[in-house]
Image (cartoon, helix red, strand yellow):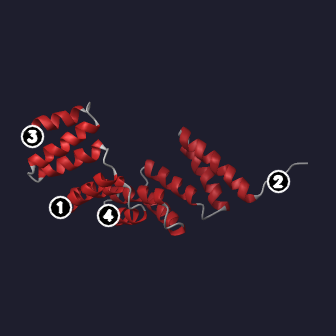
Amino acid sequence: MEKRTDPQTRSSLLYQQARRYHQMGDLGEAVTLYGKVLAARPRHTPSLLHLGEIAWQTGNLDQASVLLARALMVDPQYVEAYDLFWQVRKAQGDYEAAVGILRRLIEIRRHDGFNYYHLALLQQERGYLEEAGSLFEQAIRYKPDDARIFFAYAELLQVQGRIDAAAGKLQQALLHDPRNALYHARFSQL
């Protein structure tokens, strides 16, 4: 006698299979299986996230945006969806939305230095240099050992003509990543 699996278990097994196919790069099969999970459980946020990720990877930004927005409607605290969603919105050219999404992410994870770092880079790109500097400071506060943050902050300070401050941040970047040739080259150019 064959034992039947309940719908919850079946969709969990389908999701695990989808993840394996996704990780192996078989996106077509992964999409099919994520779709089956969503047919059984339309509010399954991990499937929505990963379908959004595949859409992002394959350049279908509009579809990625819809899927990630749907995941966030189901779970407004879904950090992984926010983290991808701001990147999709930026790629779509909607910097205002990307900034808003990053700000929401910071509300949820106030002590994650990378969120401040990404927002600082985005604001720097938009020309909001003073705000970017404050955001880099926050990023360093929560992630004081990441050379990339110090380097990015040094770049901003250099653009602002604050060469001594830029040199100080580059020195800190080099303390955390002493073999980075780019950091050495920039430091020697100051």
Distance Cα–Cα, label 2 vs label 1: 61 Å
Q: Which residue is mark 1?
A: 130
Q: Residue at x 49, y 67 (%)?
A: 76
Left or right of 126 in this view: 96? right
Q: Which residue is mark 2?
A: 4
The three-letter code of the residue at mark 3 reads Leu
Q: Residue at x 9, y 47 (%)?
A: 163
The three-letter code of the residue at mark 1 reads Glu
The first of marks 1 and 3 along the sequence is 1
The three-letter code of the residue at mark 4 reads Val
In terms of image quadrants, where is residue 139?
bottom left
> Is residue 31 visible in the rendered structure shown here?
yes
Distance Cα–Cα, label 3 vs label 2: 70 Å
Q: Residue 30: horizontal and vertical position, in percent?
A: 58, 47
Distance Cα–Cα, label 1 vs label 3: 21 Å
The first of marks 3 and 2 along the sequence is 2
Q: Which residue is mark 3?
A: 190
Distance Cα–Cα, label 4 vs label 3: 31 Å
The residue lying toward the viewer, choosing from 189 and 127, is 189
| Residue at the far right in the pictured view | 1
Q: Secondary structure at mark 4?
A: helix
Q: Secondary structure at mark 1?
A: helix
Q: Residue 123: horizontal and vertical position, in percent?
A: 24, 59
Q: Residue at x 31, y 60 (%)?
A: 93
In terms of image quadrants, where is residue 177?
top left
Q: Which residue is mark 4?
A: 99
- Mark 2: few/some/many CA within 10 Å (<14, 14-19, 20+): few
